[in-house]
Image (cartoon, helix red, strand yellow):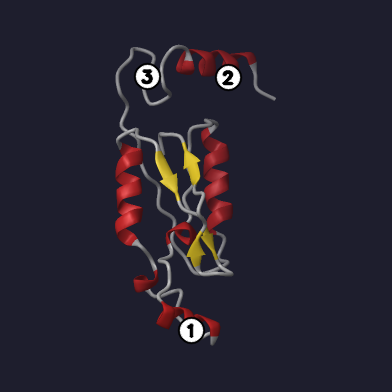
C-alpha cells in the first residue's frame, strides 16, 4: 500500500504531463537496462525486481522472445526436426529490436510483436505499449 508521500509524489509526477517530464516540465531522458544470460537463468526475475524497486508504472519490459525472426520454409523444417538454433544471433530481428528501443527512447509509442512458438511466426495483433521511460 502506498504511503501519502508516495501518492503525492506520483500525483505531482503525473499531473498534467507525461511521466517522461519532470515537475518543471523538462524532458527527462529515458534509460535502458539490459540483462543478459542463458535460458532460464533468472533474467525475468531480476528484471521484475528492478521494476518493483523503481516504484513507477512507466517501465517497459522487453523480452528478446518478442524479436525472433519469422522462419523461412527451410528454417521451419529445421525447427520441426529440432535442428534450428534459436540461440544463434541470426534467429533474432535485431533491426526491429533496435528500432523499437530507439522509438521508446524518443518517447514514441511502439508495437511489440508477439512470437508464436507453435507456428514460429508473429501473431497478427502485436501488443501496443505506450511510450515510456525505460
- Which residue position is annotated with label 3? 22
- Which residue position is annotated with label 1? 77
The answer for how far apart the CA atoms under marks 1 and 2 are is 53 Å
In the image, what residue occupies the spot 40% across and 47% down?
Answer: 33
In this rendering, the answer to whether 79 lies above or below 33 is below
In the image, what residue occupies the spot 52% across and 57% down?
Answer: 123
Whether label 2 touches label 3, CB < 8 Å: no
Where residue 95 appears, x then y in whole percent? Answer: 29, 58
The answer for how far apart the CA atoms under marks 2 and 3 are is 16 Å
Whether label 1 touches label 3, CB < 8 Å: no
- Which residue position is annotated with label 2? 6
Question: Which mark, by number, is residue 40?
Answer: none
Pick the quarter of the image with the C terminus: top left
Quadrant housing residue 49: top right
Quadrant housing residue 116: bottom right
The answer for how far apart the CA atoms under marks 1 and 3 are is 51 Å
In this rendering, the answer to whether 66 lies above or below 85 is above
Q: Which of labels 1 and 2 is toward the front?
A: 1
Where residue 77 appears, x then y in whole percent? Answer: 48, 84
Amino acid at each position: 500500500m502506498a504511503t501519502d508521500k508516495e501518492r503525492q509524489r506520483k500525483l505531482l509526477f503525473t499531473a498534467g504531463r507525461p511521466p517522461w517530464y519532470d515537475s518543471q516540465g523538462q524532458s527527462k531522458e529515458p534509460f535502458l537496462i539490459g540483462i543478459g544470460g542463458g535460458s532460464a537463468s533468472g533474467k525475468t526475475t531480476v528484471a521484475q525486481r528492478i521494476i518493483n524497486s523503481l516504484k513507477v508504472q512507466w517501465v517497459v519490459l522487453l523480452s528478446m522472445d518478442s524479436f525472433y525472426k519469422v522462419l523461412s520454409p527451410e528454417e521451419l523444417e529445421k525447427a520441426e526436426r529440432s535442428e534450428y538454433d534459436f540461440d544463434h544471433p541470426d534467429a533474432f530481428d535485431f533491426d526491429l529490436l533496435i528500432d523499437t528501443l530507439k522509438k521508446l527512447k524518443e518517447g514514441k509509442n511502439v508495437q511489440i510483436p508477439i512470437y508464436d512458438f507453435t507456428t514460429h511466426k508473429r501473431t497478427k495483433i502485436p501488443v501496443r505499449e505506450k511510450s515510456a521511460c525505460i
